[in-house]
Image (spheres, rainbow, N blue to C red):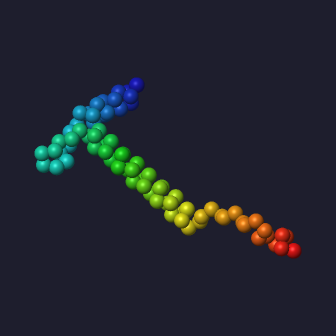
Amino acid sequence: MTRLCILVTALAVIARTRVSVLPGWVVPVPALILAAVLALCAALTAVVVLRVRADRVRLPWPEPAAPGSAQEVAS
């Protein structure tokens, strides 16, 4: 129970804390944390999309063979 109270108190202090980001800009800490998480998610999504697109360019799906081009058909 004591650890829970400490955690709740710490979260309450963090929620009420404000940080000066730029001169004249005072922002709550949870807003900064949310902005950082969203930026990280956007960057991770971009990396995944770029890797998938790069893999598709390097390794395209195999084309189906044209009818009658197999060795068995020729002989």
Callout count: 0
Q: Position of residue 4 (x, y in %)?
A: 38, 28
Q: Residue 7 or 14: which is nearer the viewer?
A: 14
Q: Which residue is more in the foreground, 14 or 6?
A: 14
Question: Which quadrant is the N terminus positioned in?
Answer: top left
| Snapshot quadrant of residue 11 | top left
Q: Position of residue 60 (x, y in %)?
A: 60, 64
Q: Mark yes or no: residue 6 visible.
A: no
Q: State the quadrant of the C terminus.
A: bottom right
- On the question of residue 48 being in view, the answer is yes
Residue reaching furthest to the top:
1
Residue for point 63% across, 62% down: 61
Left or right relative to 14: residue 24: left
Vertical position of residue 64 compared to residue 29: above or below: below
Which residue occupies the extreme bottom position in the image? Answer: 75
Farthest residue toward the front?
Answer: 67
Q: Please name the residue shown 36% across and 46% down the image.
A: 38
- Residue drawn at x 76%, y 65% as measured from the top left: 67
Q: Image quarter for residue 37?
A: top left
Residue pictured at 17% horizontal, 42% vertical: 26
Rendered position, 39 above or below 59: above
